Amino acid sequence: KLFGAGKTYDNLVYVTWSTGIGAGAYVDGKLIRGKNGNAPHFGHIYVAQDGPQCGCGNYGDLEAIVSGTAIARDYGVHSAKEVFDSYRKGDTKAMQIVNNAAHNFARGLASLNALFDTEYIAIGGSVMNDSDILLPLIREEFYKSFPVLSKGVIIEKSTLFEYIADISALALVMPSSWIESWRIYKPWMQAPELIKL
């Protein structure tokens, strides 16, 4: 919120799509934390009856169906990157798995939007290394879902991409007097080795 492309929005959601699924949300300029400081647990929303088991022990939650780990599992390989490489070569099974993952992920985003009525969604995480494939699929499905709410919502790849976790942790303890200079100079771009925790 402080340093990414969403900094001008009061209502925004950041979602990480990697080996797991996580999210953070601002509503009316306020970070949603929940009673345990963990909200929203986006990866653990229930989406499929009789779905695969998630690492958390639940069955059929979003993370079990669309995470990078799930994409690799469904194709029978060790990493989602291998699936996307096969997708780019026109492999039918890889294309089906990626398309299904993108559509289910987009439906999950539509649920988040129904809850938070957001303006801007930024997506980061290792699965988004293939955003050229995923973003068009996600947007198409998202905008079909509840058009009254989805119309005008901006969905983009995170501009802070690989630095998001580190910068977010720093932002929690950063003196407010530093914020403007960090926005201007973007030190994570100048000396990335100093930012990565």
Image (cartoon, rainbow, N blue to C red):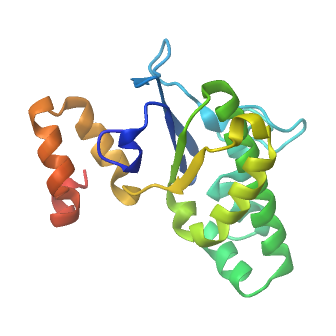
Task: Residue at 70% x, 71% y: name it.
Answer: 77
How far from the left and from the top, in percent, is residue 118? 57, 34
Q: Residue furthest bottom?
A: 89
Q: In this view, does 88 lie above or below 177?
A: below
Left or right? Give the position of 146 relative to 1. Answer: right
> Quarter-wise, where is residue 186 in the image?
bottom left
Figure quadrant of the N terminus: top left
Q: In this view, does 141 lie to the left or right of 182?
A: right
Quadrant of residue 101 within the rendered picture: bottom right
Specify the farthest residue to the top: 35
Q: In this view, does 58 lie above or below 160?
A: above
- Measured as percent of width and height from the top left, residue 14 is found at 49, 42
Q: Position of residue 165 (x, y in %)?
A: 36, 46
Q: Residue at x 69, y 56 (%)?
A: 139
Q: Which of 134 and 169 is in front in this view?
A: 134
The residue closer to the viewer here, 120 or 66, is: 120
**Looking at the image, can residue 54 be seen?**
no
The image position of residue 41, as x and y in percent, is 58, 30
Residue at 81% x, 59% y: name it: 100
Q: In the rendered image, is residue 14 in sight? A: yes
Residue at x-position 17% and y-position 53%: 184
Q: In the image, is 108 to the left or to the right of 18? A: right
Q: Report the front residue among 10 and 108.
A: 10
Number of numbered tags placed on the structure image = 0
Q: Which residue lies furthest to the right in this view?
A: 50
- Up-down relation of residue 128 to residue 39 (above or below): below
Give the residue furthest to the left. 177
Q: Report whether 107 appears left or right of 115.
A: right
